[in-house]
Amino acid sequence: MTRGGQGLARVAVVVRAGAVPLWWLGVFAAGIGVLVPGLTGRRIGVIAGAALFLVTAAVVALLRRKRYVALAGGAARAGKHDVLQDRAVTARNWRRGHRWWLLLAFLAALGSAFAVPAAGGMLLAGVGAGLRLKAAWLGSLERGSEELLWVRVDWLSRRAGAPAGKRIKAYRATGIAAGDAAPGGARRRGGVLV
């Protein structure tokens, strides 16, 4: 990194990094869990799981929106010496930092199937869906302001997460074409802005 520059990670990419592993771990846990009769029975387990999925996805998607909007509103322009972190590096850092939590969540979802079949897995999948919805919302925020939001890497949590946590003092902003991720944190397709 050059003198005076900071390492910056895309806010939407940090949010989106957990969506895929949580979704698939939840789907697998629910699929395995539905094979177990459990204490409540499969029917009640699936109905409870569907309710948990919807509520969890909504709560995760809406959580801390005011904080994101406030940080986005006060975003300073990124400097020419700031280093923009690749999308793949940001996602890998988040997943590496959370791998044990992901494993524990998956095991807990599997274990819960003996009480309420499939519900724990559907809860986990709901968190993944909620993160994906939140990243999409951030993408619409970025498109509306025509700038991408970045956060200093050293302000993220020890596990490379919490892009709106207490440690975050401000965001940085760049033009919509900066970096290798489209608004919302998705991979850019063929270099075309979306």
Image (spheres, rainbow, N blue to C red):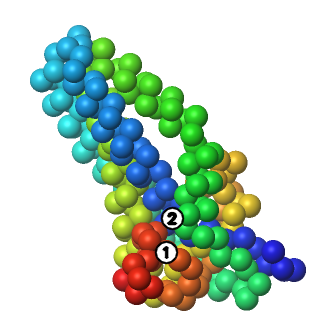
**Kind of residue at disc 1:** Ala
- Asked if the residue under mark 1 is in contact with the one under mark 2, i.e. CB atoms within 8 Å, the reply is yes
Identify the secondary structure beneath mark 1: loop
Q: Position of residue 81 (x, y in %)?
A: 77, 84
Q: Earlier in the sequence, mark 2 or mark 1?
A: 2
**Kind of residue at disc 2:** Val
The answer to whether 60 appears left or right of 42 in the picture is right
Residue drawn at x 55%, y 67% is: 87
For the image, the number of numbered tags is 2
- Name the quarter where the N terminus is drawn: bottom right
Which picture quadrant has residue 76?
Answer: bottom right
Identify the secondary structure beneath mark 2: helix
Marks 2/1: CA–CA distance: 8 Å
Q: Position of residue 46 (x, y in %)?
A: 18, 29
The answer to whether 64 appears left or right of 99 in the picture is left
Q: What residue sits right under mark 1 in the picture?
A: 181
Which picture quadrant has residue 98?
Answer: top right
Residue 107 seen in the current view: yes
Q: Is residue 48 above or below residue 72?
A: above
The residue most toward the front is 190
The answer to whether 46 appears left or right of 125 in the picture is left
The answer to whether 132 appears left or right of 71 in the picture is left
